[in-house]
Image: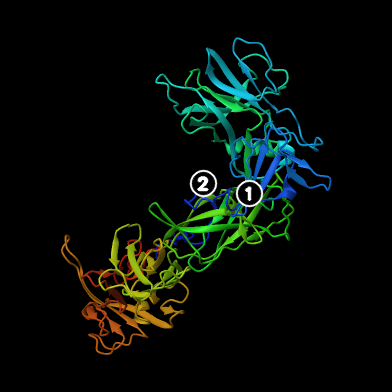
Amino acid sequence: MGAYRAHGAKSDPVNSGSRIHKAPKPVAAPATKKHRGFVASTSVEQPKLDTATTTVFKNADGTYTAQIHTHAVNYRKSDGTWARIPVDATTTATPGTASVASYRTAAAAGNPTGQGNASSSTYVESGVTQNFHGNGQLYVGKYQSHDYNSFLQFSGFGTQFANDYIVNSTLWLDTEFSGLDTTGACSAEAVNVATVSASWDPAKIDTYPGPAAGTQIGTASFAAGTDCSNGRQWEGVSLDTKTVMNWAHGWAANYGLRLSAASTAAAAKEFYADDPYLAIEYTPNGAGASYSEVSYASPWNNQPGWGKVTVQNRGTATWTPTNGYKLSYQLYTVSGTTRTLLTSPAATPAVMPSTVAPNKPVTVTASIPALTAGQTYLICWDMSYNGTLFSTYGVPQTCYSLPVVNNPPIVDTFTPGNNGSVFSLTPTLAVTAHDPDNYPGTALSYSFNVYANGSTTALASSGSLTTSTWTVPAGKLAYGRTFYWTAQVSDGNAASLWSAPDYFTIPAAPQPLVTAHLGAAPYDATVKGVDPQLGDYSTQTTDATVPGPSDGPTLSVQRTYNSLDPGVFKAFGAGWSSLLDMRATEDADGSGNVVITLADGRQERFGANGDGTYSPPAATTPSCPHRRPGTAPPASC
């Protein structure tokens, strides 16, 4: 028998089990219908939310838009409510308001609360040292060989919008004049908006280019004014939302904005100084969040997975385990560049594990429902409040690829087991297996290979079978040798790895029960002639010896007697064996094995390997050769 082989741990089939993965890089969220935000015909003013400098509207999509001016546009009446400051009816209408409103010249009777007569805006002019704060105009570009920059302040922004989640921000400019190009026509030229990088006093700055500018956060090209065909117009410049968000959350200082344009006459523009305002769209219910997936375990076809996500509270609300704020998500199927929202199965929102204040993070684990295998999905993380997703209000989701693989079957048991013995040249190999995700739900198929010990070339292969057993065909195995086998199971879509080798040994062909031990008694040193283990008495005698030539064998007639020898019809009678009784006899059981009867009465069976060769008994290995009658076996046997 060959040396025992340690049975190494069988490798897990590829993707079997909900293994934990580090989160991949985020991917772009699917294109969705953009929320509308402010629409003049459907957005409704919220007087209770107004301030002296701000008018607030609730939009049809649930968001709010605040119009923030550099000066007071509302006054508080004696009953504490806010009302609009009367306006100059000759001025242009503010975009989205019901009344005409440049708000630049009006003065309410009685000096209403919160009204400031001076605007927090000014400009600087090259070649001139002068403060222009309060003169009513703002300029950019080049006019009469002088360059201009303008500056705006929005004091109190960080207090008014503390921790609000900003969805969109636009700077609106009441444009009264645009420069003309070389043909004498108005042409659309860019107005650039940048942050100011340090504090400044609008009543003191008096030299060009004015306070140092930081990052440019918006630009728009347009032409409007009394010298243009379209007349005086409100023009909007979309601003970088991240910058405005940083102001709201205190992550960056708010030193106001700088307006500039190219140093050309065509780029010159004039704006009314008291009219510029910020339109800030922000979320309701304190909604606001950002997401970073930490790790995940993909769901299976028949069991859920999970995702662990760090969520940053970027809104004004405090989240608790019970106040309706939950981590949710949307799932999409992915086919090429097409993303299709799944409406079933539904997401399983996860409650907050603890209280989360604004600007604080929390790590949440959410369950992901079982999904059909063999597809790649997109999971887009999204907070919700009482069932309404934050993305409804324009808070972006963060999306990650979610592969749901078909897990191949797992082999559970092996027969014969590792390092076992089998007593057949055509053993039956068997496995049991199961499909952990039950996908695609079809019957399993099985494959087997058998190898000679030390070889990687299969002696025989079963091919794909519908049954979990396989009988090794005849002529492939041999007695007295060690073999190993492996198995693989498939669900029709994915196959397990080939199993680790299971070794088995086929011992030598079984020897005759009694006669295999005859002829040994004369060599027993304890009781001469008696084999105490078998109960056989044996003796030998020589009837005649004729010396042969010096270079040839001696002619002699020897007989061996065995008391347990069942042979009756022998040359020298019952129990006696000699050279005359030696023979080879094929077993009658159809195995093809051959029994050799030796001169001392002992019999040895040689196993037929099925390929025309025979395997000797174990006692006839090179260290235990056949012995001639009358000779003792070597000590190594």
Tell me if 538 is positioned left or right of 41 in this view. left
Tell me if 456 is positioned left or right of 263 in this view. left
Task: Give the residue at the far right of this rendering.
Answer: 78
Residue contact between numbered discs 2 and 1, judged by CB atoms under 8 Å: no
Q: Residue at x 53, y 60 (%)?
A: 18
Residue 427 visible somewhere in the drawing: no
Residue 315's x, y, as percent? Answer: 68, 47
In which quadrant of the rendered view does residue 387 lie? Answer: bottom right
Which comes before the other along the chain, label 2 or label 1?
Answer: 2
In which quadrant of the rendered view does residue 538 lie? Answer: bottom left
Q: Residue at x 15, y 63 (%)?
A: 549
Residue 387 visible somewhere in the drawing: yes
Residue 620's x, y, as percent? Answer: 32, 67
Q: Secondary structure at mark 1?
A: strand
Residue 26 is marked as 2
Q: Amino acid at mark 1?
A: Thr
Q: Amino acid at mark 2?
A: Pro
Residue 49, placed above or below residue 134: below
Q: Secondary structure at mark 2?
A: loop
| Residue picked out by circle 1 | 310
Disc 2 versus disc 1: distance between alpha carbons?
Answer: 13 Å
Q: Residue at x 32, y 57 (%)?
A: 456
Residue 364, placed above or below residue 451: above
Q: Nearer the viewer, residue 545 or 392?
A: 392
- Residue count near mark 1 (Cα–Cα under 10 Å), binned few <14, some 14–19, many ≥20: some
Q: Nearer the viewer, residue 501 or 345?
A: 345
Quadrant where the N terminus lies? Answer: bottom left
In which quadrant of the rendered view does residue 573 lie? Answer: bottom left
Residue 601 is marked as none
